[in-house]
Image (tube, helix red, strand yellow):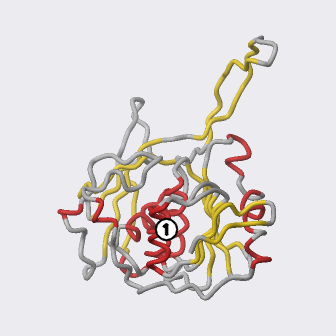
């Protein structure tokens, strides 16, 4: 099965003295993934290969299609060949259980979603303001001493970033700081979807009593994804957006930004 996450290439490194030197570099792989539901095309997203079933499951949680493991009957790679006739592993069909309704066609995404934007392919911005099946999260708080350790704990396990410097990461932790799951991807929303999809497939939703640490900024879409999964505490090493804060306040989620060097801002 294909799952190559990195690719080697030759680059010219221009030093401070203006001299260019050729050397080998390692890139994070970015490839399209077509998502089908009950054999019907639903979306195409750009992602880093690996943990694809988690990505699809988490994406469907974020879309409000799934909220329980028993709703997902099966997933499989479909035929998708490259120019050499080799299986690309870039098409996945998700089979829903008989009693799970497929997505409303009026809320279908446009054909393409980039790795940098998880909601820009949605037919209407109103479609992402969904009601979670788990009710308001209502965070019960967190231990400051645990929260300040999350960024380093996440960074220490970012293997793809170590070799490429070109991927985002999301890590799910217990309230005591134990890491439950870490996923990396060129898209920050994909990294979160992979974590949420892992949790769905493990039968862990809703994720009460957990914390999600991300390696970059906190956008509205990431708060929305956490809300759909029932995650009560979100932490980012960079800033949140205004809409991210508004959504966190409305959902009762604790939202932390600029978590670095033993300090952080509490926005919600």
Vertical placement of residue 80 versus 127, above or below: above
Residue 258 percent across, percent down from the top left:
68, 60
Residue 250 percent across, percent down from the top left:
44, 78
Which quadrant of the figure contains the C terminus?
bottom right
Mark 1 residue crowding within 10 angstroms, few (<14) / some (14–19) / many (20+): many
Q: Is mark 1 on a helix, strand or loop?
A: helix
The answer to which image quadrant residue 166 occupies is: top right
Q: Left or right: where does residue 66 sit relative to residue 99?
A: right
Observer-nearest of 260 and 149: 260
Q: Left or right: where does residue 105 sit relative to residue 244?
A: left
Vertical placement of residue 79 versus 169, above or below: above
Give the mark count. Answer: 1
Q: Can residue 3 be seen in this view?
A: yes
Observer-nearest of 231 and 3: 231
Point 61% across, 88% down: residue = 140
Residue 252 percent across, percent down from the top left:
50, 82
Q: Left or right: where does residue 129 sit relative to residue 54?
A: left
Point 41% across, 45% down: residue = 114
The answer to which image quadrant residue 238 occupies is: bottom right
Residue 169 percent across, percent down from the top left:
62, 56
Point 77% across, 11% down: residue = 19
Q: Is residue 78 visible?
A: no
Point 61% across, 54% down: residue = 216
In the picture as drawn, the residue positioned furthest to the top comes out as 19
Residue ID for mark 1:
223
Observer-nearest of 210 and 75: 210
């Amino acid at each position: 099965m294909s799952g190559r996450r990195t690719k080697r290439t030759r680059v010219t490194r221009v030093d401070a003295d203006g001299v260019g030197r050729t050397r080998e570099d390692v890139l994070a792989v970015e490839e399209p993934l077509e998502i089908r539901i009950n054999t019907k095309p639903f979306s195409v997203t750009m992602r880093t290969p690996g943990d694809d079933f988690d990505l699809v499951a988490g994406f469907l949680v974020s879309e409000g299609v799934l909220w329980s493991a028993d709703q997902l009957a099966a997933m499989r790679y479909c035929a998708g060949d490259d120019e050499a006739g080799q299986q690309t592993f870039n098409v996945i069909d998700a089979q829903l259980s008989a009693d799970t309704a497929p997505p409303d066609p009026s809320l279908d995404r446009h054909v393409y979603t980039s790795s940098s934007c998880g909601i820009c392919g949605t037919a209407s911005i109103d479609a992402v303001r969904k009601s979670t099946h788990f009710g308001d999260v209502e965070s019960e708080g967190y231990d400051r001493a645990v929260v300040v350790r999350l960024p380093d704990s996440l960074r220490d396990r970012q293997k793809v970033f170590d070799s490429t410097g070109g991927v985002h990461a999301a890590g799910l932790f217990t309230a005591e700081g134990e890491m439950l799951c870490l996923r990396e991807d060129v898209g920050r929303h994909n990294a979160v979807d992979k974590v949420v999809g892992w949790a769905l497939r493990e039968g862990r939703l809703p994720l009460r009593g957990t914390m999600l640490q991300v390696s970059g900024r906190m956008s509205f879409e990431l708060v929305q994804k956490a809300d759909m999964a029932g995650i009560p505490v979100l932490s980012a090493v960079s800033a949140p957006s205004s809409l991210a804060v508004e959504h966190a306040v409305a959902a009762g989620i604790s939202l932390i930004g600029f978590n670095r060097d033993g300090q952080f801002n509490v926005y919600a």
